[in-house]
Image (cartoon, grey):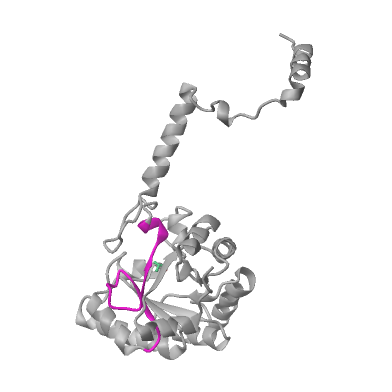
């Protein structure tokens, strides 16, 4: 079994130019498959609200829902660096709330780090969490919790003015003490600039290749989430199709009498077969 990676491994990987690969997971089986495959880290993203719970966005997701998923993921991937995603309003209110809720991910769900969305506007929250000794990752660009304010799930930093703002946000996240930062849905040119500009690892989802590692959402890459597929997703499987076809075949097998067959049945103990038959006869009413 590979050794569980930590912050220093990620710094070394950045220095050596070795890419970090990570994925979201929200439950025990998904986490154990990710660990068996050799994933460098796992994000228990608040995307669980859309992928797992069927909410229209991530805003309704609660701390309790995140913690249940984090605990399941930790049981499935005991040897993988796991990050708990802080849900909407679990950190925006006060620095104290941010520290208390970040701490719950470590104390109650054994996460290795937390992630939160925003740049300069959450700088004091990142600093407070980092000062409490908790590894915290920043997340800028398309930040789904504020997609309403951003005008929808839209790429960010495509013009010089907004790209400049994102560079200042990235610097603020690093200065506040984050151990890494995630860029979502920004042009590769901006990704390359920020990756060179910062000394902490810079990861991307929909941010092109020139950064220190890639994240994908399991529901997207496995073809499980059907509501929409962002342009940046590469689909590695068609799980929704596989599951729907399996359910269809099961329905048809039961209706036609093909399932269950003899091999799916438990049989009477052969040495007690006569007694068994006798008992059934004795209790027969019709
Ligand atoms: O919740 C999540 O999965 C995320 C990704 C969108 C980056 O934060």
Q: Does residue 126 lie above or below 4 as drawn?
A: below
Asked whether 250 or 5 is in front, the reply is 5
Horizontal placement of 85 versus 96: left or right? left
Q: Which residues are magenta?
A: 199-221
17 to the left or right of 134: left
Q: Residue at x 57, y 78 (%)?
A: 97
- Please state the horizontal and vertical placement of residue 90, each as a whole percent of the image: 53, 72
User: Residue at horizontal 26%, vertical 61%?
Assistant: 231
Give the image location of residue 158, x and y in percent. 22, 75
- Can residue 26 be seen in this snapshot? no
Residue 123 in picture, x, y percent from top left:
44, 85
In reply to whether residue 196 is colored magenta, the answer given is no
Work out whether residue 228 or residue 15 is closer to the camera in this orientation and state it.
15
Residue at the extreme top = 286
Quadrant for the C terminus in the image: top right
The quadrant of the rendering that contains the N terminus is bottom right
Q: Which residue is at a point 30% across and 84% down the rendered structure image?
A: 194
Residue pictured at 42% horizontal, 34% vertical:
248
Could you say which is closer to the camera, residue 169 or residue 264? 264
Ligand 1, image quadrant it occupies: bottom left
The answer to whether any part of residue 32 appears in the image is yes
């Amino acid at each position: 079994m590979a050794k569980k990676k930590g912050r220093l491994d990620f710094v070394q990987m950045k220095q050596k130019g070795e890419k970090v690969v990570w994925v979201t997971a929200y439950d025990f089986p998904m986490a154990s498959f990710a660990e068996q495959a050799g994933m460098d880290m796992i994000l228990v993203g608040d995307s669980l609200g859309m992928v797992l719970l069927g909410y229209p966005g991530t805003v309704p997701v609660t701390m309790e829902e995140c913690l249940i998923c984090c605990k399941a993921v930790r049981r499935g991937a005991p040897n993988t660096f796991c990050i708990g995603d802080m849900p909407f309003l679990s950190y925006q209110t006060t620095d104290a709330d941010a520290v208390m809720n970040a701490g719950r991910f470590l104390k109650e769900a054994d996460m290795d780090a937390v992630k939160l969305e925003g740049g300069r506007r959450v700088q004091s929250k990142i600093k407070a969490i980092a000062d409490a000794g908790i590894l915290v990752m920043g997340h800028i660009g398309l930040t789904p919790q504020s997609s309403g304010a951003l005008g929808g799930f839209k790429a960010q930093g495509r013009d010089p003015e907004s790209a400049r703002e994102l560079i200042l946000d990235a610097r603020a996240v690093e200065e506040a003490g984050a151990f890494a930062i995630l860029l979502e849905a920004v042009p590769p040119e901006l990704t390359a600039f920020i990756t060179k500009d910062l000394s902490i690892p810079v990861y991307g989802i929909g941010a092109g290749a020139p950064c220190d590692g890639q994240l994908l959402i399991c529901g997207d890459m496995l073809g499980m989430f059907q509501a929409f597929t962002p342009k940046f997703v590469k689909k590695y499987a068609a799980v929704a199709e596989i599951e729907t076809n399996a359910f269809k075949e099961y329905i048809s097998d039961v209706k036609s009498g093909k399932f269950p067959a003899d091999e799916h049945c438990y049989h009477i103990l052969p040495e007690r077969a006569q007694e068994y038959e006798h008992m059934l006869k004795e209790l027969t009413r019709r």
